Image (cartoon, coloured by chain):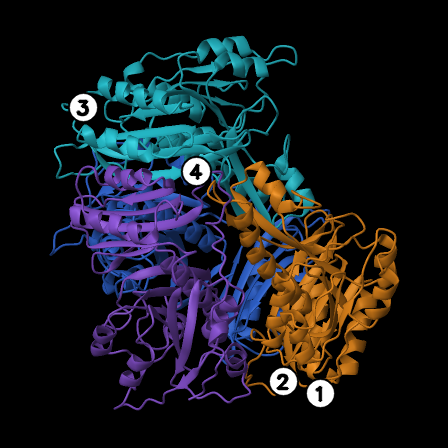
Chain colours: A orange, B blue, C cyan, D purple
Amino acid sequence: MLFFRQISRRSRPYSFHSWKFTSSFAASTLGIHVFHCPDEVGIVAKLSECIASRGGNIQSVDVFVPENKRVFYSRSEFVFDPARWPRVEMDNDFTKLSKLFNAQRSTVRVPDLDPKYKIAVLASKQDHCLVDLLYGWQEGKLPVDLTCVISNHERAPNTHVIRFLARHGIPYHYLPTTSGNKGEDKILDLVKNTDFLVLARYMQILSGNFLESYGKDVINIHHGLLPSFKGGSPCKQAYDAGVKLIGATSHFVTEELDAGAIIEQMVERVSHRDNLRSFVRKSENLEKQCLVKAITSYCELRVLPYEKTKTVVF
Amino acid sequence: MLFFRQISRRSRPYSFHSWKFTSSFAASTLGIHVFHCPDEVGIVAKLSECIASRGGNIQSVDVFVPENKRVFYSRSEFVFDPARWPRVEMDNDFTKLSKLFNAQRSTVRVPDLDPKYKIAVLASKQDHCLVDLLYGWQEGKLPVDLTCVISNHERAPNTHVIRFLARHGIPYHYLPTTSGNKGEDKILDLVKNTDFLVLARYMQILSGNFLESYGKDVINIHHGLLPSFKGGSPCKQAYDAGVKLIGATSHFVTEELDAGAIIEQMVERVSHRDNLRSFVRKSENLEKQCLVKAITSYCELRVLPYEKTKTVVF
Amino acid sequence: MLFFRQISRRSRPYSFHSWKFTSSFAASTLGIHVFHCPDEVGIVAKLSECIASRGGNIQSVDVFVPENKRVFYSRSEFVFDPARWPRVEMDNDFTKLSKLFNAQRSTVRVPDLDPKYKIAVLASKQDHCLVDLLYGWQEGKLPVDLTCVISNHERAPNTHVIRFLARHGIPYHYLPTTSGNKGEDKILDLVKNTDFLVLARYMQILSGNFLESYGKDVINIHHGLLPSFKGGSPCKQAYDAGVKLIGATSHFVTEELDAGAIIEQMVERVSHRDNLRSFVRKSENLEKQCLVKAITSYCELRVLPYEKTKTVVF
Amino acid sequence: MLFFRQISRRSRPYSFHSWKFTSSFAASTLGIHVFHCPDEVGIVAKLSECIASRGGNIQSVDVFVPENKRVFYSRSEFVFDPARWPRVEMDNDFTKLSKLFNAQRSTVRVPDLDPKYKIAVLASKQDHCLVDLLYGWQEGKLPVDLTCVISNHERAPNTHVIRFLARHGIPYHYLPTTSGNKGEDKILDLVKNTDFLVLARYMQILSGNFLESYGKDVINIHHGLLPSFKGGSPCKQAYDAGVKLIGATSHFVTEELDAGAIIEQMVERVSHRDNLRSFVRKSENLEKQCLVKAITSYCELRVLPYEKTKTVVF
């Protein structure tokens, strides 16, 4: 196990491009609130009244009420004055509404005041998604604290990834796996303080036990257009099938392989001129974009589970 | 001038695909409301409270507050029970809110109860956009009443367009134009009962006087990616410029040629293999889609003017 | 069975947009040649020498030699003078080359001299692909002779499709199917003079016997992104899977359902806001474009089978 | 001026993904040949005969003969045995054909034998394109030797770019410019051994004198969809114009600002929700991809000038 002591540098500035603004209101701190509860008349009214009563000014609202389902989803962005609406009271206010509407979920985030989400990245031998995440994080494009990288693949100290991690003081944990020992206990121990996990081409299946013990979300990137091409070598499967479009899918991890709810999908055109190598190359380019998009949306509270197999992505 | 008496057939059924649903609420008629006013705290609360107080159940809300502009835009979809919230009272309720917030715009539509928008289509020699609109209208995809087609190009009675119009009882007005006489008075007379106009490749410039007298919106399709290639022969301009992407733009008509606010733009890839004819063919395909998209969005109250040169398209 | 006698009107002018040009050469008739044979040194040289020796001038060549496969595919466009290179001699010349290289396929077409491909369209209840083909054919965008429409769904004489076919003198054959009798013998009889078949949402499986007896290509449109969502209700399958992209696939028909080589695929983005109806509506729009693209490419000799499951699409 | 001595590390391995293959022919080295000459009958025959006569086996050919222009462009990929067709004789053979057909251009490259193209990158303050090129080069995705980076913007030694360059032994030349002195003489001196130049958001206009003295190609990335939004602040121009699509353009540099022939263009959708910052962020993402695509295509001999304002991109 490699470990570097520069923890303070782990936290990179992230600019919430779409969120920052100079408001002419005193209220100028951004808050985000998502809500998921059984549908009934008046939810938007109560939520917006709550925000307005504290001097908060709504910048955007997105409401989704699927037909015939009697469920309600919303995401609101608002600006407020923390002096007038202290963070703790905000939590209390939304908790009251949550009880009122018997909500399954009510989450509020204030990006400028709340700690960033802590994540761990799990990867195997393939580098491209991991490296892309590291670069994006370094450039302040990923709104997360990167606590560690875990891999079942050993990397030499002079490799690009290890040197990058060393410079930034991020530990790299090499956990060899065998058919009998997936090292899940060690992983659980390493990630217990994270908010969610990212599988950046981690070629091991996490067990139902692991997922249950961890208890938080795990986001995976699959190099195929799910539900096509589940399992191993999806590019090879796609190549053999003679498809004219290849894709990548970021999704939540469930016990069943590659069957969790889809967050984002992207495609690119291929032709008879593409061989398996260019399928892989094009796919890798999609995977990187698709994974970053999913992580960013997740951190901005845009992703909500919807029924068992679906997501709402505001 | 050709004229056919089958007015009753003009009105085609339109299925508001995205709107219809079987609600388990008694309230099952869809209403749409758009609002544009100076921004202040509490607008969403008041709007949603108004809807809820009448038993209306919000299905979706979209709010846009541009930064540093102190303006507010919203669009809401809700279901309601017309027995409980009569159409006239709905108008009154929203008018009160409109006054309260000093709104520049407050429009409500109930697609199942309100008359369809009446439009006239102006076209010149090129058929593709006109024919596409006619087909789309016939198939119930355009939520409008087509009152007439006006053209500065004469068409023989056995042409496709004239026969189509005859079958459906829609008048075709041939108004020849000269450099001195654009026939705008006659057009004004023909379209005075319409809700908006559609220029489906109408190769005449409508004067500021005309636009002012008409006083309602005019939507045009331009066969170039505005603000590039304004004016005549945009495909030729694009071809000569050696572009690798061509586009089409639907926009509101203003006195200044091809300078009105853009509603929708679409592109397609071209290469050195494309000649001027294939530029035109690809462009025509874009124009049709881009115009239908703009008209449909407009009728669904999704398009709002924003500053002088922009649109909000919810 | 409906039948109309206006056969002469079946043949619509088709403008080979990408092919027409005013050559400054005497040779100004377009020829297209495709070739598929075991790879060896010198094939392009022999083919192009053959064309040049007859005064033909090559406008474009596309050669594909898949790695490690020792097979060769090419498609050439050239202009020639029919007085100097009579059509029959052209056939003889290419047949000689075909023998020389032991070709599996050598096809030549001269669009201005050769008869158009004759097709029959098979459709069930869904209209959108059939209607789109009829419109495209009427506008001269489909380079085929439409010999008849065959359906297992009865249509009343005053329906749009039947009236259209009547106006153009194209027979509509209603062949009811039962579980025991798919009417394949009748179909075989009706289509025996066609060059290929188009299944425009034909909801019956053609048997291996039928395909063998017919012996020519059958092109199908599938409303899903194959190999995902084979079989029935692919839109419903996709909706239930929570995908973020839906697609359509045009492919050759083989005995195994929805497993033939793919010709073209197209996708469109969907979100949680899309319900099953909008999945269907978006899919239909893709299906139409995807089927027309496949037919057009096929007629322009751009589509060649490649291994069992793939196509070369020049 | 910073300078580092590790020249040997400048040259990174580049995998010509689409080119490598294990041929069952003895001939297994890839050659690429492009040709541009007045059109006449028999050019393809002569070119392919030349290759075949030396045992070369054509893998792909692309021929473009624009209508009514009497010019011919081709690009061929072939495999050959260098023992049988020595590199020098290959040059001689193609030079003879070049004379025979009075060619304006005949270039041959053998990626495995020929030196990589040497380039210099010019950049100003904006980092994103420069950093993306550096990463791509480091990962072996750019088939060039990076000789130096030149900038009119000073960077501190501990910045990301300077540390990267230091690690790889690539000099960074800071050349301050004034209105009277653009430092073009110094630039000319620094780049005299390069094969082409890349402007990665270099905010200085290169003079006609410079371009003439340099005498080789210069590729620029423009953060707008040319010919729209030439000159400064194209994102601001686009934002103010209320466009619904933004784009980036890579093009050859000519004396006239942003008017050289376009190589590649890419677009992305924007809406009223996008502010100027997100216009810039989306544009930067396009710029990076568009510039890398242009450089890669150029190095693979896919880009040929066509008339004054256009390019052929095979």
- Could you tell me which quadrant the N terminus of chain A lies in? bottom right
Secondary structure beneath dot 3 equals loop
Q: Which of the two discs, 3 and 4, labels the residue nearer the N terminus?
A: 4
Secondary structure beneath dot 1 equals loop
Mark 4 residue crowding within 10 angstroms, few (<14) / some (14–19) / many (20+): many
Image coords of residue A5 (percent x, y)? 76, 83
Where is mark 3, residue-wise? C85
Q: What chain letter is assigned to the residue under label 1?
A: A
Residue B168 in sight in this render: no
Q: CA separation, marks 3 and 4?
A: 29 Å
Q: Do circles 2 and 4 both sit on a common chain?
A: no
For residue A84, the mark is: 1
Looking at the rendered image, the disc whose residue lies closer to the viewer, 3 or 1, is 3
Q: Which amino acid does label 2 sit on?
A: Ala
Q: Do circles 3 and 1 both sit on a common chain?
A: no
Q: Do circles 2 and 3 both sit on a common chain?
A: no
> Residue shown at 84%/62% (left/top)?
A215
Residue B173 in sight in this render: yes
Q: In this view, does B14 lie to the left or right of B10?
A: right
